[in-house]
Image (cartoon, rainbow, N blue to C red):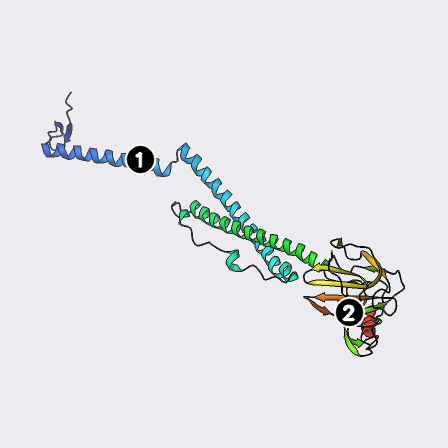
Amino acid sequence: MKRTIYYFNPKTLSFEKKEFSLKETVKRVVWFLATAVSFSAIIIWISFYLIDSPKELMLRRENNELKNELKKLDRRIDELTLMSKDIQERDDKIYRTIFETDPVPMSERYPFLVEKNEYDNIKDEDVIKMLNNIHLKADKLCIELATQSYSFDTIANLVNTRSEMLQSIPAIRPLPNMYEISSGFGYRYHPILKVLRPHTGIDISAAKGTPVHATADGVVSRKEAGSGYGIAVVLNHGYSYQTVYAHLSKKLVKPGERVKRGQIIGYVGNTGLSFGTHLHYEVIKNGKHVNPVHYFFNDITPEEYDAILKSSQKVNQALS
């Protein structure tokens, strides 16, 4: 049904029928459509940007929770990094100093980390930045801890090696109750020729049968000590050390046998080219005879060492 529109004419004081031209009709239609489109746009904008859907609310909440967890994880990695740096510092400045070993080079501690492009593909501004930083920190921390673990393995090997080496140094007296030396190391008068000749060890006077102790861990050598040494024991200690115990009345060990520091290996005697019951004791380092007195430091007081050193410096007659 066609709609008729009337309007009030103030000149005639009556309602008259309104007649619309084509132009007016088109304008009214366009105005109506523009108003409808504008209103629809406003409604859509409000719906999309001001009012969250249940799904968007859930995603927003999950995103906030994820951010909080990432912040906690980031702080945790920072704490682990500090712990790792503390371990590295103790490793370099304490442990390796004790064992006289160079610190781990920085190039080995931080061998790789140029920026990794694989983390840059995702574009979210907040969460992905934190993920990127956490990935980088985690990679660095893994490398640091792996390097530190290897460093501690090295130190553990050093501990075992140094412990074995320390046990191989002839550091105690061959006769525990020895407080002076009958004839010291160096040039001494030969007991027969009565001329000064090199004395390659020290002579310690003691009663026949006095127990003689190994001064370090080692293996009984199969080679003989030499002519004139009588009954003797030669110990190979490794790390370029050897010791010789000569003029024994009896030996208690066999070639190839392992002995420990302090173990009784024989008894004082007067065998071989000897002028009086005593022990002739030698220390050999890198194939050269050295003064055994300088190695008495593990079972002796400073006063006892001074007395032994003083008695060893007398240029007197050797007993063998």
Work out which residue is located at the far bottom of the displayed protein and give it: 195
Work out which residue is located at the far right of the displayed protein and give it: 207
Residue 7 occupies quadrant:
top left
- Numbered tag placed on residue 44 in the rendering: 1
Q: Is residue 205 left or right of residue 63?
A: right
Mark 1 and mark 2: span between their CA atoms?
106 Å
| Disc 1 residue crowd, few under 14, some 14–19, many 20+, Cα 10 Å | few
**Amino acid type for the residue under numbered disc 1:** Ile
Residue sitting nearer the eye, 20 or 190: 190
Residue sitting nearer the eye, 96 or 48: 96
Q: State the residue at coordinates (35%, 39%).
A: 49
Q: Is residue 144 left or right of residue 226?
A: left
Q: Position of residue 271 (x, y in %)?
A: 85, 64
Q: State the residue at coordinates (44%, 45%).
A: 127
Q: Position of residue 158 (x, y in %)?
A: 64, 56
**Amino acid type for the residue under numbered disc 2:** Gly
Q: Which residue in the structure is indicated by mark 2? A: 201
